[in-house]
Amino acid sequence: MGRAGLSMPPLGLLAIAAYLRREIPGVEVKVADCPGSRLTPEAFAREVLAFAPDVAGVSVYTGTFSASAAAAAAVRKAAPKCFIAAGGHHATARPEQCLAGGFDAAVIGEGERTFCELVRRLAAGVPPAGLAGLLLEAGGAVTRPDLLEMDSLPLPARDLLDMTAYRPALFGYRRLPVMSMVTSRGCPFSCSFCSKEVFGSAYRAQSPRRVLEEMRVLAQTCGAREISFQDDTFTADRGRVMELCRLLGESGLDLTWSCMTRVDLVDAELLGAMARSGCVSVAFGVDGAGDAACGAMNKGFTVARARAAVAAARAAGIATRGYYIFGYPGETRASLEAALRGITAIDTDHVFFAFAHPFFGTPLYREAREKGLLAVSDEELLDAHDNTVPLVKVPGMTERELAGFCRRAYLEYYLRPGPLLRLLASPGGLSGAFRAARSLLRWY
């Protein structure tokens, strides 16, 4: 998300840290966020050496596998007796690759309970074999632990990192400072590009009062003036959001907020309630700019529905951001040009474009591989973390042509009177536009 200006604290790690501190009193926990804190490998090694951990957990994502493996190697060198576990998307999707990459174990699924029990057993000198959610050797069987009830989780341990080091998405906020929250897990939808390896399809969410409690804490302890909800589909439970809006209206909190959701999960009444409770921006994962593309991605809605949702949000006074994917299997030069016309017709205030990323285990990955459309090998996918690089081939177009189309799409979208005026009126105005333009020009 670097092109969008977004730098988000690792709330998953901070949630596990908070769970550890609550369940094992006296445990000493440290969180190192190498990307967010801009830690060099040498600085990271020094931190590990100073802390001398007995157990370490490393987040492993498909596009950053090599960096995660290097972090594990640095831990191994600085603390040879440390037990190192991999967690996150790639640890669940391809755990045996993590074991081969130097990790002692892979945590499968959500990590709080499994990692906490691992720490408890190792501290007591009890072998972790048979622990639910933990793979220790290739070919081993794993039973996942029961899913956690969201209201039972402690607040993420934000005190372990400098929250001022993070920044919200460009054009995605109204007031600073902005603090991010995640209030739900799991997604009941089946977009063909999305990996749900960790949290699955069972949607679970915090109660409205629990959400309000965390918002209040962030306002009082971190000086937050705005909350960025990072849930994949914040309005999946309409009643929950309506009740949260009511509670916010009664709370007296001076907070604005933003969220992400789908265009078929909002309506005029809901958006009106959201706006009155402080919602200033909604990001819609439209992804496909035509009905054929939405169908290929298994989005489950039409472009007409997207246009209606954006119009309803604008009528409620809520700014909109549209997220779109280029380079999907079946696309051609002509379909990309048509997509740009469709994106213009949907007319969100801001747009963010990304190329399709074939995560392992997704229908997108299988289709691209079966049709010979993968532009990189499986090995290269392990370091393909930049969504501005085409990873799926579009017949008749080179990688350079695809990248050029994406740059032109931004320019054609914003160099229209309406979007240009809205861009300049956004927080940051000219400076934000300059940052966006500079990022675009540096692309190639």
Image (spheres, helix red, strand yellow):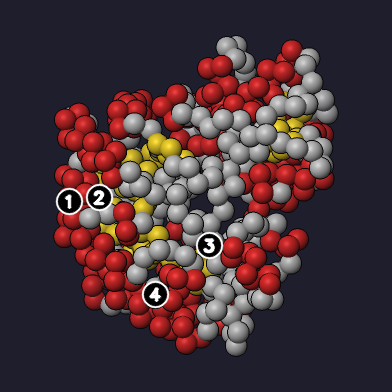
Q: Which residue is mark 3?
A: 192
Q: Which residue is mark 4?
A: 291
Q: Which residue is mark 2?
A: 280
Instruction: Give percent across and percent down for residue 1.
Output: 50, 56
Q: Residues within 10 Å of mark 2 (few under 14, many from 20)?
A: many
Q: Is residue 187 above or below residue 181?
A: below
Between the C-alphas of marks 1 and 3, the distance is 30 Å
**Residue 201 appears in view:** yes
Of mark 4 and mark 1, the one earlier in the sequence is: 1
**Residue at (59, 65) in percent of width and height:** 364
Q: Which residue is mark 1?
A: 269
Q: Locate the C terminus by quadrant.
A: bottom right
Q: Are marks 3 and 2 in contact (CB under 8 Å)?
A: no
Between the C-alphas of marks 3 and 2, the distance is 30 Å
**Residue 441 appears in view:** no
Of mark 3 and mark 4, the one earlier in the sequence is: 3
Q: Is residue 61 above or below residue 177?
A: below
- Badge 4 element: helix
Between the C-alphas of marks 2 and 1, the distance is 15 Å
